[in-house]
Amino acid sequence: MGNQADRWLLTPIRGLGRVPLSVISNMGRMGIFLVQALFFTFAPPLKFFRLLKQIKFIGFDSLLVIVLTGAFTGMVLGFQGFYTLSRVGSTALLGPMVALALLRELGPVMAALMVTGRAGSAVTAELGIMRITEQIDALEILGLSPFRYLVVPNLLAALICLPLLTAIFNVIGILGGYLIGCKLLGVNGGTYFGSMSDYMGMKDVLIGLYKSICFGGIIAWVCCHKGYTAGFGAEGVSKATTQAVVLSSVLILVCDYLLTSVLF
């Protein structure tokens, strides 16, 4: 009876400890995966044509969603900024407000979230299907590194494409703010663009650049890891894809806060 009572008492305690241990072990596996990916990134040869294919998939194929999201984000900023600044008689500062909001925060974050939903989920599903159909195991049996063929091209493509997509997002967003603020609400166009140089500097551009590079690394790292370690069956792939999108989005927001607190 004593042993049974001890078992009843210890089982809930073991359950409480199992969750943090699982989280720590997953973090460790993800850390090891990142180290391996970085090692093969700097170890030649580079699969150049595979890299070009992933640049097209992650970058060029994401242009439409980036342009649409950037345009409507800029338009919303134009509306909200105009009515907020009109309360204090500072509508002339609409241009700097839209530009700073996009360059420092909304541009990198929104572009990264859009790429995560469009390209990151597809990368996870592709690697997950390759895992459950044993294509990754076949590469290993042939003596070929799956990291070199599957992970490194995605990592480099994300690091290259995210800053470029963010820049396009920012430009389209600023033009969207101009369309609403100047053409619809009557703000002077020269004032909209001219005042930007007075309130913006290279530091603002570099902050957005640093963030977009970090976000690109996070997307490739998390999505590749989840796909590479996907469970078997359709359920395993769908679960890995969902986890990749959710975890990438959360890490992007957390990283955005940390970078903002450091770079400001």
Image (cartoon, rainbow, N blue to C red):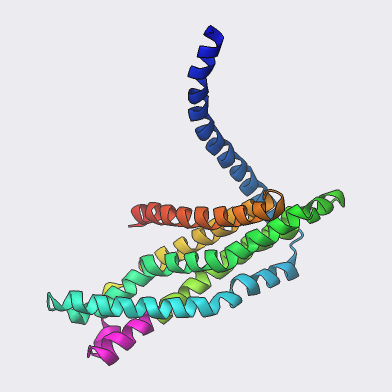
Residue displayed at 82% across by 50% down:
140
Look at the picture and state if 174 lies above or below 130.
below
Q: Is residue 189 magenta?
A: yes
**Is 120 left or right of 140, judged from the image as shown?**
left
Question: Which residue lies most toward the top here?
Answer: 2
Q: Is residue 194 magenta?
A: yes
**Is 159 left or right of 192, judged from the image as shown?**
right
Picture quadrant where residue 104 is located? bottom left
Q: Is residue 43 visible?
A: no
Picture quadrant where residue 80 is located? bottom left
Q: 161 or 141, which lies in front?
A: 141
Query: Residue 199 at x, y = what percent?
Result: 27, 73
Q: If the image is split into quadrants, where does the C terminus sit?
A: bottom left
Query: Residue 157 at x, y = what percent?
Result: 62, 66
Question: Which residue lies most toward the right here?
Answer: 142
Q: Is residue 63 visible?
A: yes
Q: If the image is split into quadrants, where does the N terminus sit?
A: top right
Look at the picture and state if 17 lies above or below 227.
above
Look at the picture and state if 56 lies above or below 193.
above
Residue displayed at 52% across by 73% down:
164
Q: Which residues are magenta?
A: 173-197
Secondary structure character of the magenta stretch overall: helix
Residue displayed at 36% across by 56% down:
260
Question: Which residue lies most toward the front here?
Answer: 1
Q: 192 or 222, which lies in front?
A: 222
Look at the picture and state if 235 lies above or below 92.
above
Query: Residue 135 at x, y = what percent?
Result: 80, 56
Residue displayed at 50% across by 58% down:
214
> How many numbered marks are there?
0
